[in-house]
Amino acid sequence: MKIPVPGTRKIEAILFDMNGTLRSREPHAPTQRAACERMKDLLKLEDPSDAYWEELAGHYKAYGHWAQEKLLQLSEKEIWTHWLLPEVHPDQLEPVAAELTLAWSERKGRMVPKPGAEETLRELKRRGYRLGVISNSMSILDIPRCLDAFGWKDLFEVVILSSVVKCRKPAAEIFWAATSTMKIEPVHCAYLGNRISRDVVGCKRAGFALGIILEQPGGPRAEEQDQTIQPEAVIHSLNELLDLFPKRVPLQIKA
């Protein structure tokens, strides 16, 4: 398989989305029980009702819609004090906001690598590509801890999170935060994600040469099918990247 666009030899860096692209969440009872207990401890709750969790989930969903519409990411302190639990005194929430956010996500299960992720990443790095992460994330702790647990910290030159840079994909600024840190022009970059509306649209706004989609089983989501901007390539497994990106040959610069 080859990417059907010219200029692929100019690609020096490949950057990745995390959720649904390099990792996925699976149900895991011990993780979920521990997360619930941690939230109860952090919030000093005795025995919260199902209605309590449902109300919290509703607030979380409302914040998510607002953040994506505005392409903004509030700090975890702001999310918990202004959106999720505005009735709780900020002095109780602010010191534990980061751990609360992590526990809230782990109530749904644990993160596991997508099939073939590590082998593909290490081979791309061996082939001479610079690698990085650009991901929407409410949490400042989740992805760094996950990379550490997976043993992937050595693979990525940059890890750019919306929770740190305060904007969300598809805003071009989050992509430029990565290219600026790497001191590389966007035209020499490719990006892999699983959402055209966020990943391909965002990287193209930022001037990336290639936007690639890892398509999920069952095909694209309904809302993704009418996008004006389309990816240069669609893959169905991560190891297909090795067909797209052979060993990199440094470009010869004429004097």
Image (cartoon, rainbow, N blue to C red):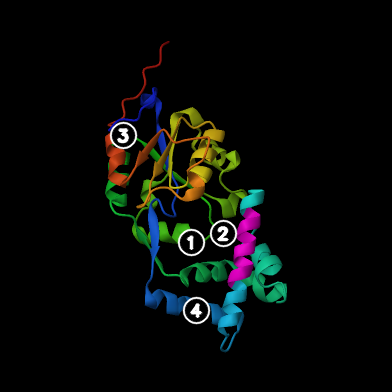
Q: SS class of the residue under badge 3?
A: helix
Type of amino acid at the residue the image marks with label 1: Asp
In the rendered structure, does residue 70 fall within the stretch colored magenta? Answer: no
Residues in magenta, as a range = 57-67
Q: Earlier in the sequence, mark 4 or mark 2?
A: 4
Name, please, the residue furthest toward the bottom. 46
Q: Which residue position is annotated with label 3?
A: 244
Type of amino acid at the residue the image marks with label 4: Cys
Q: Are marks 4 and 1 in contact (CB under 8 Å)?
A: no
In the image, what residue occupies the spot 44% across and 52% down?
Answer: 18
Type of amino acid at the residue the image marks with label 3: Leu
Residue 36 - label? 4
Task: Report the Cα–Cα distance between label 3 and label 4.
Answer: 42 Å
Task: Report the Cα–Cα distance between label 1 and label 2.
Answer: 9 Å
Nearer the viewer's eye, disc 1 or disc 2? 2
x and y, in percent, of residue 54 in the image: 58, 76
Name, please, the residue furthest toward the top. 255
Nearer the viewer's eye, disc 2 or disc 3? 3
In the image, what residue occupies the spot 45% across and 29% down?
Answer: 188
Residue 59, compared with residue 39, is above or below; it is above
Residue 142 - label? 1
Q: Is residue 64 visible?
A: yes
